[in-house]
Image (cartoon, rainbow, N blue to C red):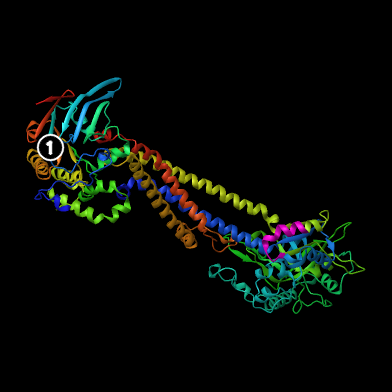
Amino acid sequence: MYKYLLCWRYLRTRYIALASIVSVTLGVWTMIVVNSVMSGFAFEMKSRIHGILSDVIVESHNMNGFPDAEYHMEQINRVAGEYIAGMTPTVHVPAMLTFHYGGQMMTRQVTLIAIDPKTAGKASDLPSFLQHPVNRRLPSFELREGGYDTRDHQSGIESGDRDWMADAGWPYRRLRVEREQAFEFTRPQSTRVAPPELSVAEPSSAIEAAETATEAPADPFAVPKSEENVFNPLHEQHTGLILGIALSSVRDQDNKERFLLRPGDDVQLTFPNADSEMPKAVYNQFTIVDFYESKMSEYDSTFVFVPIEKLQTMRGMLDPVTGIRCVNSIQIRLKDERDGNLVRDKLRAAFPTEFYNISTWRDKQGPLLAAVQMETTILNIILFLIIAVAGFGILAIFFMIVVEKTRDIGILKALGASGRGIMGVFLAYGLSLGMVGAGSGLVIGLLFVIYINEIAGLLGRVTGREIFDPSIYYFYKIPTIIDPFTVAWIVCGAMAIAVLASVLPARRASRLHPVEALRYE
Amino acid sequence: MSDALHLASPSRVPRRRTAGPVAGGSPADVSEPSAASKPARLESVRLSKSYRKGRVTIPVLRGVDMQVRDGEFLAIIGQSGSGKSTLLHLLGTLDAPDEGEVRCDGQRIDNLPAAKRDQLRNQRIGMIFQFYHLLPEFSALENVLSPLMIASGAWRYFRSRRAHLTKAKELLELVGLGHRLKHKPRELSGGEMQRAAIARALVAGPDVLLADEPTGNLDRSTGQEILKILRTLNRQQGLTIVMVTHDLAIAEQADRVVRLVEGQVQQA
């Protein structure tokens, strides 16, 4: 009993000891914050990567792919049908995006992904990243009359309004084309540059012929209208294209996003055709019909989506006789993501690896996820060392307290307290210091995590420098996940260190000779 | 039981056991007031103790033989350095002798295991010191309660805390400190601290009170008051007291005086 009373009194009267546990508090606090933020980041990243990539991907090694996606999907179904929730064929091609803005030609390197709008939603979360609410239900490559989100539907109010999206779609396109046409009349016709004739390996379809014959009207200064042109941009669109949102913007000096493109604008894509002997670059006009915003800046700044059938035709990925089309990957979504490795191994057994590369999304993004994991581990080690350093502080201060309390220890022994009991006083004192330190660290840490965005905002206002720049991560809020198990571990670890640090002084106290302790002045 | 603690009561300080861990082997009836036929309450047999200072060994006690009878107020007097405090520590099992024995009720106690000695000090021997040795973190009342806290675990103490509190308050009343229960030692005067120390020494109902220069740090009149309390406890409750002092005037108020000269008893 005296142990608890005495250690309670010590706790309340020895402020120097409380000072020594401030570092425990700080360590626990930072560990909780770091772990919550890191796991929040990891979770967001995982769910985003996973949402973008499907669970299992069957790819061809070469860019021109394998023919007959239906046949392959049947085979896949035969091998692992019971695990599969949905499949969609895609074509991935590197490409160059070109558009005109303010008289300049802008060029971006992109990954062109041809998707089947009907099945794309079954194999990935792609539709949910689009900006038009109808497209989110079923993606379409038709330009909409309007109704694009003016606010980021994945974030809260903090993200701010995107006013330029209000008239996106046909209203913007009509306005733009009318302005361009009005401007064209005032310009001499001689500036017109004829586009080079396309050389496409396969015979083009009628639509394509019409498209390729048309010039890019995106540049208001360079492209005039010719009377015989059958394509009227006022009422018609090119092949639809969904653009990664980061491709449509640039950052100005204030690090604010400035949008150069919006749905209704036309862009040009240049990509290799499927000629296996001598691939040539072909280009086509496309009309932006929507933006893709996955919040993974890597994807948002490289991905461009087009309808698969159009691209297959443009690239010549079809057999001229049978009309069988080629794809270069099949995206598979599983009923349960955890079966990924199992399905992958089954498919690997069924499809020859000379021709097919079969991987799960984790295989694809493994290094990234592993890097996050690694960072968390290293940070934890460093922060735990901080608490360990605090342990040595406690050790030193405890020795001082034992020396200071030598006489009291003698008194207690004279009153019949055992060495074990005296040891208990100091161990209990160490534990209660640890509890106070870890407890306050826990409370501060949890509050900090809960209000982390408010704190970041406040710090940003005070220092005049944005602490968490959403543009870097494409998160508008700092994502956090508080894992009770981790928090419990941190708190227990900190308390254990405090107790361990008090073992040596406590042993010393318990071994003091009562007579010498009483004589001590 | 608590009635017994009042000075007015003629009964003795209550014994909590008749067969404690120490007295366990001895069938001698300790509750019997007449002490003549019993072994001495405390006894030292050829006690020797020396301290080592570097390479020099300084003998402090050289074969001390003495008895403390039950209900006796014994004063041990000697010059400083004569080993009287050491003798008291040995009697109270705070220290172990180099040679010789300490006996309590005929039972050897100096070689008991540590846990038994702790229990003995806690329950059968009360001690007061020249510098009071109260715990500065505790109030007067808590200081008095501390032997009881040491004796029992938190749960047991908690269950009987009312009885303990009553007892501690009564003892503080007894030594005239009933009005300063909540005061910390630093808020008390020397005399008051020594009163609290006496109350603390008595709270577990010990057989013997060992007093190490109880008046040594007090002025004469306050010292006399403390001595009066000890005297009264001895007279009215039959408490056995061993008091160490260097002051003959103080020692003469005891029943018997043992003079310690150079580590040996010199019968007066």
Magenta span includes A29: no
Q: Which amino acid does label 1 sit on?
A: Glu
Residue closer to the observer: A359 or A153 = A359
Q: Of residues A325 and A153, which is closer to you in this image?
A: A325
On the image, the x and y values in percent for residue B73 come to 12, 37
Between A297 and A198, the one nearer to me in the picture? A297
Q: Is residue A192 among the parts visible in the rendering?
A: no
Q: Give the range drawn in magenta.
A: A333-346
For residue B182, above or below residue B74: below
| Left or right relative to A104: residue B8 | left
All told, the count of numbered labels is 1
Percent coordinates x, y for residue B198 in the rendering: 17, 43
Dot 1, crowdedness within 10 Å: few (<14), some or many (≥20)?
Answer: many
Q: Given the image, what chain letter belongs to the residue carrying mark 1?
A: B
The picture places residue A338, in percent across and down from the top left corner, at 67, 60
Which residue corresponds to the image point at 36% horizontal and 48% vertical from the top-left?
Answer: A18
Residue in front for this viewpoint, A502 or B85: B85
Residue furthest out toward the top: B56
Asked if residue A47 shows in the view, the reply is yes
Principal SS element in the magenta part? helix
Indicate whether A68 appears above or below B201.
below
Q: Is mark 1 on a helix, strand or loop?
A: loop
Q: Where's residue A294, x and y in %?
A: 65, 65
Residue topped by disc 1: B72
Quarter placement of the C terminus of chain A? top left
Q: Is residue A251 left or right of residue A449?
A: right
Which residue occupies the extreme right position in the image?
A321
Seen in the image, is B16 located left or right of residue A1?
left
